[in-house]
Amino acid sequence: MKLAIYGYGNLGRGVEAAIRQNGDAELVGIFTRRDPKTVVSKTGASVFAADEILANKNAIDAVILCGGSATDLPILTPMLARHFSVIDSFDTHARIPEHFAAVDAAAKAGGTLALISCGWDPGLFSLNRLYASAILPDGKDETFWGRGVSQGHSDAIRRIPGVLDARQYTVPIESALQSVRAGEKPTLSARQKHLRECYVVAAPGADKAAIENAIKTMPNYFADYDTSVTFITAEEMRANHSELPHGGVVIRSGKTGLDGEHRHTIEYSLKLDSNPEFTASVLVAYARAICRMAQRGETGCRTVFDIAPADLSPLSGEALRKTML
Amino acid sequence: MKLAIYGYGNLGRGVEAAIRQNGDAELVGIFTRRDPKTVVSKTGASVFAADEILANKNAIDAVILCGGSATDLPILTPMLARHFSVIDSFDTHARIPEHFAAVDAAAKAGGTLALISCGWDPGLFSLNRLYASAILPDGKDETFWGRGVSQGHSDAIRRIPGVLDARQYTVPIESALQSVRAGEKPTLSARQKHLRECYVVAAPGADKAAIENAIKTMPNYFADYDTSVTFITAEEMRANHSELPHGGVVIRSGKTGLDGEHRHTIEYSLKLDSNPEFTASVLVAYARAICRMAQRGETGCRTVFDIAPADLSPLSGEALRKTML
């Protein structure tokens, strides 16, 4: 499969690395909205200006979009889906239905196939919510995130006056996790599920008390959580907080039997050293499926719910049945 | 979906209970090879002789086979697939390719759709091996089973002279689990992964030392494992070992990045109070997919690898995207 990367930040670099791990994948090029002369690929891949992508149409089986969900993907995914099979990792859960509709219309008009919201949440976690709820209809699931860096929350802190740099870790609360695991089906508020741990580099002379107060009272992001704020130096930030780890867990507990007498727990968990590289690895596996399905003539928009697992693997159906079933 | 149960042991009773948890499922009847007058359904379902099933062909969307893998399913699944869409839980891993071929030929000849080897292993565990290996190609996975009752091993002990009853628990070895979880990719022998814990009721006057020796030296079943044997009374067996719990975990750890510098762990675990009831719940969810796919005109044999997750859920694609993605 001949893949193109559109957008070259952390996620794009992750896709570039993931493509090298898959023998059947080839990177046609990196397409960037920056000046391509200023962008250097560590693997020596060709770098093109974004608007050159149409000229490379015949060389590309699928485009992996590596832009942000807030403003990039709602425009870019439908735009590119008119010409290419595309995969994105759109992760604004509440806006998925409208993004799906826009991409579906574009892909149908273009006779292409698109996959949106692919990654681990939305993505693998969504799959596990679906599988577990279909199997244990009399049950309840909970998703916990972390311990990991939330880039949205980190950015929100950086916008506070006097903040030079910030990193926010989302931390699941162990007692809540244990209660869900034990099948107690607790009703949990946001505050009862996660802590927010913030590391902040303040500008010299900045009012740290004011910064701490601005963080802890910030609506949506922090006000509904127990939040800790620790001021550190720029050196400490570089030394201890330069990575982007993440992870989390989806747990469903449910009952079976004529009187609900038996209890079951299904748990799926991820521990990731690099959120963007792992997300990129999911995107490349799903790119394989999209290329195959497009070759079978499918068009329109899909999500991970619509993809048969066998299409993700380089192995044949026969080999899969023999080695993995 | 109108479902029939063929075979009425622990698994068949589990399917009967699971059907009641799914509003879109209806139990047409239980088909048994015993005298149907001797079989009583706890839910008041109709019980028929096995050979009456063909006469009910038009009333049945799919047949869930609840027989054993050793001798029942290799005969029954192809036989019924000539006339019905069928789902079985064939679990002899080494013989899956030949079972698949036989069922595929029968289903194609009959114009029906079949799903084999559906449950949790093979089944949900297989899915997780596939998803995880497609996403982390530079990695390794391990499957651990238990703590849970192995019916095959329990039966093997019961065949030893002087044994009245027996229950064997397969127990994962915690240190091996932790090593795999830590991404150490150990090479583990059978003995290093699982313990075998046996509870035995001996006949009055039986030679317990001889029984213990016969168990511990039994090839394939016990000789390659550290095995403990505890003699108990029939009352203790009834009081403490009458349930069929099981479970286990699939763990894959792998690396990403240009130099494999980031490590990731994907873990899927099940804790089941009742192995047959949980397996039955998986069968009923997959029966929904098979009924839908058969209605779309698909024929031949499938495995869980071939089923798009959305087909398992009673919810529409739109509802799934809105609530679970």
Image (tube, coloured by chain):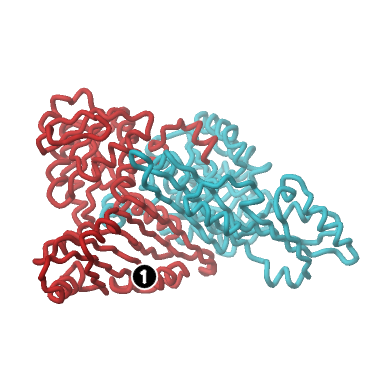
Chain colours: A red, B cyan
Q: Is residue A153 visible?
A: no
Give the vertical position of B201 relative to B195 (above or below): below
Q: Quadrant of residue A235?
A: bottom left
Q: Residue furthest right?
A: B205
Q: Label 1 is placed on what type of residue? A: Ile
Q: Chain of mark 1?
A: A
In percent of the image, x 56 and y 52: which residue is there? B144
Query: Secondary structure under badge 1?
Result: loop
B160 vs A312, left or right, is: right
Q: Which one is in front, A173 or A96? A: A173
In percent of the image, x 21 and y 54: which residue is there? A92
Q: Which residue is mark 1?
A: A173
Q: Which one is in front, A269 or A322? A: A269
Q: Quadrant of residue A186?
A: bottom left
Residue B83, x across and y down, in percent: 53, 37
A75 vs B246, left or right, is: left
Q: Residues within 10 Å of mark 1 (few under 14, many from 20)?
A: some
Q: Is residue A231 visible?
A: yes
Give the vertical position of A300 relative to A198 (above or below): above
In percent of the image, x 18 and y 40: which residue is there? A7
